[in-house]
Image: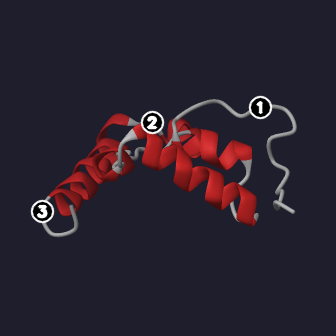
């Protein structure tokens, strides 16, 4: 990822931003490759890591949902720690 794909993806993102978006669209939208899927573990390991992060209080439900490319939910910005 670091030495091969990322430099090319950054070039593509910049080209899309420069060539395909109007000035008003540039204020509203951004171009980004979501690369975390390349590095994801299996579902059980990923969800276990999310549980640890949520219980430790450094990820909220909505941050986890964002990592999974899901919409936010009401009340999901609360940070909780396990007792």
> Looking at this rendering, what residue extends furthest in the bottom direction?
3
Alpha-carbon span between mark 3 and mark 2? 29 Å
Q: CA distance from mark 3 to mark 1?
A: 36 Å
Q: What SS does tag 2 mark?
A: loop
Q: Position of residue 83 (x, y in %)?
A: 87, 63
User: Where's the N terminus, which quadrant?
Assistant: bottom left
Residue designated by label 3: 4
Q: Where, by quadrant of the figure, is residue 57 drawn?
A: bottom right
Q: Residue at x 33, y 49 (%)?
A: 35
Q: Which residue is mark 2?
A: 22
Instruction: Classify residue 1 as left or right of residue 50.
Output: left
The answer to whether 79 is drawn above or below residue 27 in the figure is below
Left or right of 15? Residue 8 is left
Instruction: In the rendered structure, find residue 73 and report the number of the disc placed on it.
Output: 1
Quarter-of-image position of residue 74: top right
Front residue of 29/38: it is 38
- Which mark lies nearer to you, 3 or 1? 1
Numbered disc 3: secondary structure = loop
* Comparing labels 3 and 2, the label whose residue is closer to the camera: 3
Q: Disc 1 on helix, strand or loop?
A: loop
Tell me which label, 2 or 1, sits earlier in the chain. Answer: 2
**Sequence-wise first label, 3 or 1:** 3
Front: mark 2 or 1: 1
Question: Counting other residues with Cα less than 10 Å from the Cα at mark 2, is it few (<14), some (14-19), or many (20 or more)?
Answer: few
């Amino acid at each position: 990822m670091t030495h091969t794909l990322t430099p090319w993806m950054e070039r593509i993102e910049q080209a899309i931003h420069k060539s395909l978006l109007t000035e008003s669209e540039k204020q509203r939208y951004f171009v980004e490759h979501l690369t975390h899927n390349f590095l994801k573990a299996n579902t059980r390991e990923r969800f276990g890591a999310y549980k640890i992060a949520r219980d430790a209080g450094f990820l909220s439900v909505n941050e986890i949902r964002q990592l999974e490319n899901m919409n936010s939910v009401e009340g999901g910005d609360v940070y909780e720690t396990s007792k």
